[in-house]
Each structure stands twice: as C-alpha cells, then as structure tokens.
Image (cartoon, rainbow, N blue to C red):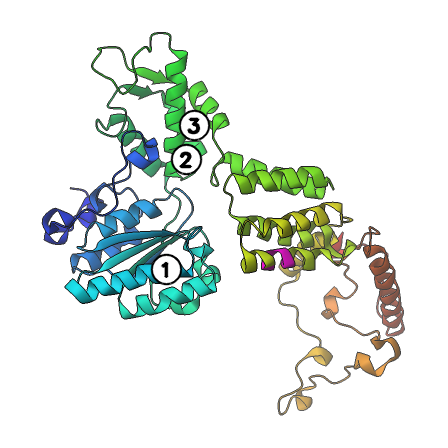
C-alpha cells in the first residue's frame, strides 16, 4: 500500500463496514465516460492527498462537518463530495444552484430537520456551483448549517471569499483543490482504458504521442481528458473498416483499437463547448476581440453563443467590467458604469432576464470609442515602481494629523488646491527623483480628447512651476517608465 493509499484507507469507519444505504445513484453504461469513471470510494480517488488529509482524519473519527470544495473544473469536486458522503451513514440530497430557489432550499432543510428529529438520521446536502446562490439563498442555508440540521458540501470554481457570505463560509471547512498533475490525469486515463466494468476493458490502446497530447490538452482537468478520450475512441472506431463490433465488446477476439495522435487532435476540435476547454478560451477570446474591434454584431453573437452553451454569466460580466477600463477607459466615461450596472442587474434579476442587460453592455462596449491609455499607464506605473523601489514620500505630502508631525516637518509647505481658483495649484506630488515622469498618456479618442487637453494644460503649469523652483523640465524628454 502506498502512502496515499494509506491516507485514504479509512479502516472500520469507512463505508465498507458501515453498511450505509446508497447515496448518489451510480451512472449507467449509457452515461458519458467521465460520469461512469467517478471514484466509488476515497481509495479510488486520484490526487489532492495533501488537501484531503484533514478531511480523511475527520472521517476516521467518524465525523463529517460542512465543507466547501473550491477548485477549477475537472478537479473532482463532485466526485469527492459523493465519495465523502459514502463514508458516513447519512441521507444524500443535492440541489442545483442554477435552478433552485429559496423555497427549494427551505423545503430540503425542513425535510432534513424532520428526519433528524424522527430517527436521528443526518442529511448531506450537496450544492454544485454554490457560488451562483445569491445572498438570500445563502442566508437560508445558514441556520441549517449552524444547527447541524444538514451537513453542507458546496462545490465552486469561484473564489469563495468573494462569492460566499462570510457567516456561511466561516461555518464550513474550506478544501482547496488545485488542477490535477499530468501524472494524475495519466493515471485516470489508464483506469479508463483498463476498467472492465466502466471503461474500455483493454479493447483500446493509446499511442504514446496520443497520450502525451491528451494529457497536455486536459491541462489538469480529468473530465476534459476523459471527454477527449471518449471522442478519440469514437473517431478511431469510425476510421477502422474492421470495427464492426462495438469497442467495449471484447468477446469477438479482434485486435484492440489504436487511438493515434491525429484521433486525439481531431477529438479536441470536435469538443462541445466546455467551460474549461480550449473551445471555452477561444470563444472568450473571440468575444473580447470583437468588443475591442468595435463589432457589435460579432460581440452579441459570441456572448449569446456562450450563454446558450452554459457559460457562467458572472464570468462574462466580469470580463466586460475589466474590458471597460482596459480597452475603453476614459474614451467613454460611461463604459465602466454600464458594465458594472449589467453585472449588478445579473445579481438582482438573474437569467434569463439579465441577458438583456448583458447584451446591452456588450453593444455599448463594442460601439464605444477605444483607448488603452489606462492599461499603458498601469504597466508604466508598475515598471516605475519596480525600478524606483521605495522612493521616500516628499515631506509636504506626509501625514500631518498626529502630534509632533509638524516638528518633523511633515505636511509643511503643502498647498491646499481648493484655496486656489479652479481647484488646482502646481506642486510636487511624485518623489524627488521621479518628478517629471509621465505614466498616463491619453489618446484623443472620444471623450479622452477633452481629458488630453486638460492633462496637457495641468502638466504645462506644473512644468513651469518646477522650472521656477530650479527643477528640470522633463515634459518633452519622454524619460522613464512612461515611454
């Protein structure tokens, strides 16, 4: 037994000795390969040994507390939830965060509470994509988790510190799952090829180059690897003129089918939309480039195509908020409020109604004048910080509100801008050695033309003031990180 096997060997507290009633129903042979290959026990579970050590220790004590499983798609969150639930004598219930409302949550909790009162039987409530629950739905869960009426296992691909209410998160143990290693993915692929009950029963072989490519395109996602393998096997079957019998039928004595590199590459191209796969990133890239290229027709097409395929609308809303500053900026001052408003509308009304707001924002961003001056200023600022390090704050800009600050010279000589006409007075704001640096270089696109005129005038006055102090006029030198 390996170290990892020992970690997951629960001994007498495991389900083998527990005689628990069945939890989740095992997928049948008509289910996708990834569903059929779900582990049946913690001993079958591949990867994440370090992250699961505290959970295994808890199960060895015969305990199970509420958990939040956080990790990228295809890392085994749902599989882990089912095998954990299988180690305890509790009823399994699950809700979809996409379709369930507060009424559904309360109904499940009421049923679990009645069962607990009647016969002491606990309930494991699994909620996939729990980050899609709004505040009201999460609040409805809180008393049930707090009082132990249900043991919550929530799965999320999003950062729970951003997406989950702090009181709910504080009552759950957070289990962070990283992307699987290449060795983990390869082990899962081997299991699929060899498994006589749920996999290909040795009737399929995988060329070395095909295996390497399959593991590479999976990028730590077991589900993506199994989906691609299943598709590649189907392609190999279609290609082979002698494949009259199904590949899983090994009774005919035929030679095992061989999956080639071309089969795997072709399978990757035929994938249905997968939020973790290459197709996902390609379509997101097409969406962003359509926005940047000011093509509202293409932007709407890619947006709706992804939504119809099941993309998380919050992901798309976040990308539009980022785009509003990254690619529009001050060329249209209404772009960022528009994108944020669409995100807010999504939280308030949900899909499908929020599709109007998301489409509205996409058209607005696509047709807005474009400027990446904010992006360039940010990059220039980071480069300057890296180059200059911790340059001292000029004394007149330092905090002067505490006792004895004046004796140290802090705040002395600061000129309050509101005491001057127009609310502006030329004075130094950068550290001495950085004075005259230019990080923000506005374009003359859209609204930013007026911003450029104002910035030019303010900098002209500042340069004149610096010359009068005996400084150097760097306005036209283009020195520093802003070039």
Residue under numbered circle 1: 105
Q: Indicate yes or no whether the magenta region holds residue 342.
A: yes
The answer to the question of whether label 1 and label 2 lie on touching residues, with beta carbons closer than 8 A, is: no
Alpha-carbon distance for marks 3 and 2? Answer: 12 Å
Instruction: Give whichever of discs 3 and 2 has the lower sequence position.
Output: 3
Occupied quadrant, residue 321? bottom right
In front: label 3 or label 2: 2
Residue at far top of view: 241
Q: Secondary structure at mark 2?
A: helix
Q: Secondary structure at mark 1?
A: helix
Residue drawn at (21%, 49%), measured in percent from left and top? 86
In front: label 1 or label 2: 1
Residue 17: horizontal and vertical position, in percent?
A: 10, 49
Residue 455: horizontal and vertical position, in percent?
A: 83, 62
Residue drawn at (71%, 70%), measured in percent from left and top? 431
- Sort mark 1 into few (<14), some (14-19) or many (20+) by Cα contacts within 10 Å: some
Rendered image: mark on residue 213: 3
- The answer to whether any part of residue 474 appears in the image is no
Alpha-carbon distance for marks 1 and 2? Answer: 31 Å
Rendered image: mark on residue 184: none
Alpha-carbon distance for marks 1 and 3? Answer: 43 Å
The magenta span reads 340-344
């Amino acid at each position: 037994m390996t170290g990892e096997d020992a970690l997951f060997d629960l001994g007498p507290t495991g389900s083998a000795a527990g005689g628990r009633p069945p939890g989740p129903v095992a997928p049948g042979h008509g289910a996708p390969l990834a569903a059929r290959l779900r582990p049946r026990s913690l001993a079958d579970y591949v990867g994440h040994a370090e992250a699961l050590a505290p959970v295994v220790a808890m199960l060895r004590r015969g305990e199970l507390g509420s958990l939040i499983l956080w990790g990228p798609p295809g890392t085994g969150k749902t599989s882990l939830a089912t095998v954990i639930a299988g180690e305890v004598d509790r009823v399994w219930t699950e809700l979809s965060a996409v379709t369930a409302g507060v009424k559904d949550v309360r109904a499940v909790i009421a049923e679990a509470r009645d069962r607990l009162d009647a016969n002491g039987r606990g309930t494991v409530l699994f909620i996939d994509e729990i980050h899609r629950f709004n505040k009201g739905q999460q609040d409805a869960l809180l008393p049930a988790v707090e009082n132990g009426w249900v043991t919550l296992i929530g799965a999320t691909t999003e950062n729970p510190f951003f997406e989950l209410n702090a009181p709910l998160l504080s009552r759950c143990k957070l289990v962070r799952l990283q992307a699987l290693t290449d060795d983990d993915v390869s082990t899962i692929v081997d299991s699929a090829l060899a498994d006589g009950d749920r996999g290909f029963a040795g009737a399929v072989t995988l060329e070395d180059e095909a295996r390497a490519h399959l593991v590479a395109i999976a990028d730590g996602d077991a589900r993506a690897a199994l989906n691609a393998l299943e598709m590649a096997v189907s392609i190999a079957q279609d290609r082979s003129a002698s494949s009259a019998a199904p590949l899983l039928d090994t009774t005919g004595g035929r030679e095992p089918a061989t999956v080639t590199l071309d089969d795997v590459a072709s399978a990757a191209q035929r994938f249905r939309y997968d939020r973790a796969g290459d197709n996902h990133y390609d379509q997101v890239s097409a969406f962003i480039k359509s926005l940047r290229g000011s093509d509202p027709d293409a932007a709407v097409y890619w947006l709706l195509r992804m939504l119809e395929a099941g993309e998380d609308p919050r992901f798309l809303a976040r990308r539009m908020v980022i785009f509003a500053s990254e690619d529009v900026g001050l060329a249209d001052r209404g772009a960022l409020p528009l994108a944020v408003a669409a995100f807010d509308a999504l939280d308030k009304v949900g899909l499908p109604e929020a599709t109007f707001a998301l489409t509205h924002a996409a058209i607005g961003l696509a047709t807005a004048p474009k400027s990446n001056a904010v992006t360039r200023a940010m990059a220039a600022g980071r480069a300057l910080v890296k180059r200059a390090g911790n340059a001292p704050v000029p004394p007149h800009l330092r905090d002067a509100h505490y006792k004895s600050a004046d004796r140290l010279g802090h705040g002395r000589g600061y000129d309050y801008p509101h005491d001057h006409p127009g609310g502006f007075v030329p004075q130094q704001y950068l550290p001495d050695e950085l004075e005259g640096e230019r990080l923000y270089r506005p374009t003359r696109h859209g609204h930013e033309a007026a911003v450029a005129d104002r910035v030019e005038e303010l900098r002209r006055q500042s340069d004149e003031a610096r010359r009068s102090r005996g400084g150097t006029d760097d306005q036209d030198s283009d020195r520093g990180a802003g070039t």
